[in-house]
Image: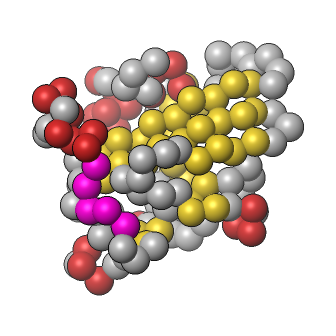
C-alpha cells in the first residue's frame, strides 16, 4: 500500500499551507522557520526515502553513524522561543487536516490505551476524529533534549 503514495515534507510558521516550504529530506542543511513566537531550524532524515521533490537522496550520512544505523527516520529541530512558554503549555505531537482512521492498523485504539496507561499518561488526542491529533508534554515526548 505504501508504494501507492509519495511523501512530501513541508514546514512553515503556521498551519496556512502557502506559508510552508519544502523540507529537503536527507539534505545537508536544515530549513529556518520564523514567526512572532519562535525561531526554529528543522532537519528531516528518512531511510529509503521515496518522495518529493523528485531526485531527493534516498538516505543520509546520518544513518551511517553507529548510533543511528538501525534508525528509520530522524526529525531534528532546535527552537528559540521569543517569549516565555510554560512547560505545561509546550506540547509535541502530530495532527492532520484529514481523517486517518481508515489507515490505522486493527487494535490501534487498544494499543494507545495501553501506552497512555503504562508509558505516557500525559498523551492525549483523538486519532479517529475528522482532524486527528495526538499530543503529549514536550519534555516527556522528545527522545533527546
* 89 left or right of 78 in image: right
> Which residues fall within the magenta stretch?
56-60
52 drawn magenta = no
The residue lying toward the viewer, choosing from 93 and 54, is: 54
59 drawn magenta = yes
Q: Position of residue 18 (x, y in %)?
A: 74, 69
* 32 left or right of 122 in image: right
Q: Is residue 135 above or below residue 2?
A: above
Q: Main secondary structure of the magenta part?
A: loop
Residue at 17 percent of width and 39 percent of height = 64
Q: Position of residue 94 (x, y in %)?
A: 51, 48
Determine the image quadrant of residue 22: bottom right
Q: Extreme bottom residue here?
A: 4
Residue at 61 percent of width and 55 percent of height = 11
Q: Position of residue 69 (x, y in %)?
A: 14, 38
Residue at 65 percent of width and 36 percent of height = 40
Give the number of marks: 0
Q: Is residue 113 above or below residue 108?
A: above
* 93 left or right of 116 in image: right
- Residue 103 seen in render: no
Amino acid at each position: 500500500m505504501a508504494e501507492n503514495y509519495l511523501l512530501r515534507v513541508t514546514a512553515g510558521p503556521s498551519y496556512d499551507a502557502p506559508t510552508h516550504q519544502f523540507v529537503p529530506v536527507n539534505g545537508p542543511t536544515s530549513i529556518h522557520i520564523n514567526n512572532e513566537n519562535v525561531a526554529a531550524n528543522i532537519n528531516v532524515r528518512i531511510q529509503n526515502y521515496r518522495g518529493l521533490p523528485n531526485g531527493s537522496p534516498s538516505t543520509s550520512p546520518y544513518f551511517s553513524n553507529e548510533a543511528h544505523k538501525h534508525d528509520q527516520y530522524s526529525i531534528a529541530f532546535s527552537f528559540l522561543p521569543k517569549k516565555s512558554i510554560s512547560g505545561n503549555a509546550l506540547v509535541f505531537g502530530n495532527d492532520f487536516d484529514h481523517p486517518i482512521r481508515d489507515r490505522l492498523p486493527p487494535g490501534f485504539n487498544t494499543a494507545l490505551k495501553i501506552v497512555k496507561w503504562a508509558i505516557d499518561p500525559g498523551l492525549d488526542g483523538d486519532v479517529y476524529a475528522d482532524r486527528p491529533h495526538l499530543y503529549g508534554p514536550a519534555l516527556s515526548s522528545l527522545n533527546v533534549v
